Image: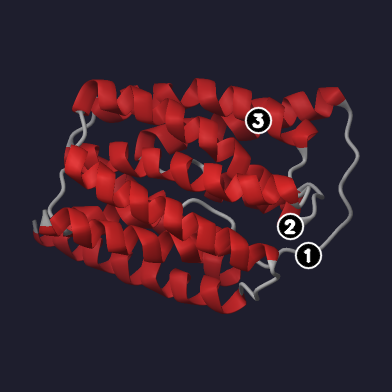
Amino acid sequence: MSTAIIAGLVTFIFTSALTIAGVGAAFILIPVFLYLGIEIHVSMTTALLLNSIAMIVASYQFIKHKLIIWKVAIPILVVATAMSPVGALVAQGLPAKPLKWMFVGFLLFAAVMMLFYRAKPREDKEASWKELLAYGAGVGGLAGFVGGLLGVGGGNIIVPVLVAIGFNPKKASATTSFIVIFSSFSGFLAHVHMSGVSTMLLVWTALGSAAGALLGAWLMTDKLNRKQVKLIIGIILLAISAKMVWKLVLG
C-alpha cells in the first residue's frame, strides 16, 4: 500500500512537470518505479497506461485551445499504434538487464533533448498528404516501436521531429500528446496481456496521473515558461541514468 501511495505522489509531480514540457511522464516514472522495487515489465505496463490517462486529460485542454494539428496527428498515430505492440512483444523476449541498458540509452537521449534542444517558433508547415503519410510511416513507426519496447509512449521522439520539419513547437507538443494516447494504450494492452499489472499501484498512480495532467495542461495553456522545468527534468534524468548505470555495472 505505502509503495503504491508513494508512486501515486511521484506520478502527480512528474506528470504535472512533463505535461508542461509537452511529453508523457512514462520515461521518468519507469526508473522511479524500479527504484521503489516494482518489477520492470509491471513498471512499463503501468507507465504506458498512465501516459494514456494523462494525455487524455491534457488533450482535452489542447483541443479547446485548438492546438492539435489533426492532419499530422492522424497518419502518425495510426502507424505508431500499430507498431507499439510489436515493440512490447520484443521487450517481453528480452532479459531485464539488456532492457535496462536500452532504457538508460533512452534516458540519456531524453536528457539531452531536455537540456540542449531549442525549438524555434515557425508557422505551421503546409505539406501534401503524401508527405504526411511518409511522416506517419517514418516517425510513427519509430516512435511506436521504441515506445512499446521501452514503455515510454514515444513522445520524446515525435516532438523534436515535428518541430524540425517546420511545425510550431507548442502545436507539435499538443499534437504529440494526442498521438501518445493511442500509441501508449496499444502498448499497454500488449504488455498487460503478457506481464499483468498491480491493481493497487494502478489505482493510486492513475489518480496522480490524471490530477498531474490537469494541472500541467492548465499551466501550459496559460503560457508558463517551460525553460526552467526542462532544465530541472534534464538534470534529474542524468542523475537517474548515472544511478542505473552504477547499479547495472556493480550488479
Question: In the picture, residue 195 is in which quadrant?
Answer: top left
Q: CA distance from mark 3 to mark 1?
A: 22 Å
In the image: residue 42, left or right of residue 11:
left
Disc nearer the start of the sequence (3/1):
3
Residue 179's spot in the image, x, y percent? 60, 36
Count every numbered label the image shows and give the total: 3
Disc nearer the start of the sequence (2/3):
3
Secondary structure of the residue carrying tag 1 is loop
Q: Label 2: few (<14), some or many (≥20) within 10 Å?
A: many
Residue 184's spot in the image, x, y percent? 46, 35
Secondary structure of the residue carrying tag 3 is helix
In the image: residue 41, left or right of residue 162:
left
For label 2, the residue is: 169
Question: Which of 168 and 109 lies nearest the eye of the viewer?
Answer: 168
Kind of residue at disc 2: Pro
What residue is at 59 percent from the left and 57 percent from the top? 22
Label of residue 120 in the image: 1
Label of residue 144 in the image: none
The answer to whether the residues at label 3 and label 1 have Cβ atoms under 8 Å apart is: no
Kind of residue at disc 1: Lys
| In this view, 114 is above or below 68 | below
What residue is at 39 percent from the left and 49 percent from the top? 26
Residue 219's spot in the image, x, y percent? 60, 68
Residue 32's spot in the image, x, y percent? 26, 59
Can you see residue 189?
A: yes
For label 3, the residue is: 76
